[in-house]
Amino acid sequence: MLNKIIFLVLLIINFYAYPQSFLIRPSAYFTYGAYSDKTTSMQYSLFLGGSIGQNNLIVIGYDNIKINNDLWKFGQNNYSIGIHYWINGLKFKLDFLSLTGEFKDDLVNNPLVDNGTLISPEISFGVYPFYYGIGSSYFSQRGNNKINSIQVYLRTDYYPHYKFLINLIPTFQLISDKSKYLSLQTSITYFHSYELSFNSTFTIGARKLFYNPDLMVLFNQLETQKSNYSFRVNYNIYKNFVASLIYQKTKFTNYDINYFVFGLSTPIYF
């Protein structure tokens, strides 16, 4: 609730300062997860982005996740806010994430609760076709499973052609259980036309409690993630009304997950 109030106050202030260029972009996603051990998950995600002029963007998000197994159930709510600001060729970004999770099974009388918070700053700069950045995140989980994670990453965006974007994010992680991880996430996007684009993302190396700064998504499973890759298609179906189809496969130490995602988004100008 506090995040929503802050977001609305900032939008109102900026609207009166720059009423000639006001944009909001609502989006919604549904995700179905099929686990190799017959567990299933469903996730509903809502995001609302807003900007005034060309030098700022605010994004707030909400996720509701339900995971069902024959022996247990898990539910989680995520609340996020991201603030982006451009000045003199530099981009400053600051993300906040708060989550609450509840685990139930037949052996516990009271649900086991996990609460967590994350903060992630980033700065980036560059001139076409190269852009560079550095960022970090700190995640702290409390409750039944107490664990902390520090993540430091670099960013390189390269446009070999105006229709292609290559993104590299090498990441180092230090977890409070004394484990260390090094990974490289690579993303390739092809802008076929104004209406249609394709994206493929894959990861080399292992990671745990990984925060994706581009998607504002935290993989807060406690198991080590061995690999991750995804394919995405965006299609402008009608007047900037964009539909997204995504397939993602994630391999952990003891199980795999196949995710199927459908999303809709559209910009609204004032």
Image (cartoon, grey):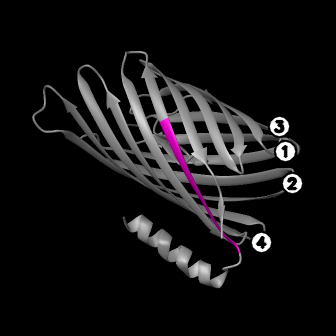
Report the front residue among 164 and 50: 50
Q: Amino acid at mark 2?
A: Tyr
Q: Which residue is mark 3?
A: 192
The residue tagged 2 is 128
Disc 4 residue type (three-letter): Asn
Tell me the magenta residue range.
21-30
Q: Residue at x 28, y 40 (%)?
A: 145
Q: Disc 3 vs disc 2: which is toward the camera?
A: 3
The residue that label 4 is drawn on is 88
Q: Residue at x 53, y 75 (%)?
A: 10
Of callouts 3 and 2, the N-terminal one: 2
Residue 159: image tag:
1
Alpha carbon separation for disc pair 3 and 4:
31 Å
Question: How far apart are labels 3 and 1 at the CA level?
Answer: 14 Å
Query: Which circle's residue, 2 or 4, is located before the other in the chain?
Result: 4
127 displayed left or right of 61: right
Q: Residue furthest left?
A: 109
Give the percent coordinates (x, y) of residue 139.
Answer: 43, 49
Residue in view at x 77 percent, y 42 percent? 195
Choose top left, top right, bottom left or bottom right for residue 194.
Answer: top right
Dot placed on the residue nearer the N-terminal end, 1 or 2: 2
**Looking at the magenta stretch, what is its main secondary structure?**
strand
Q: Residues within 10 Å of mark 1 (few under 14, many from 20)?
A: some
| Towards the viewer: 13 or 74 | 13
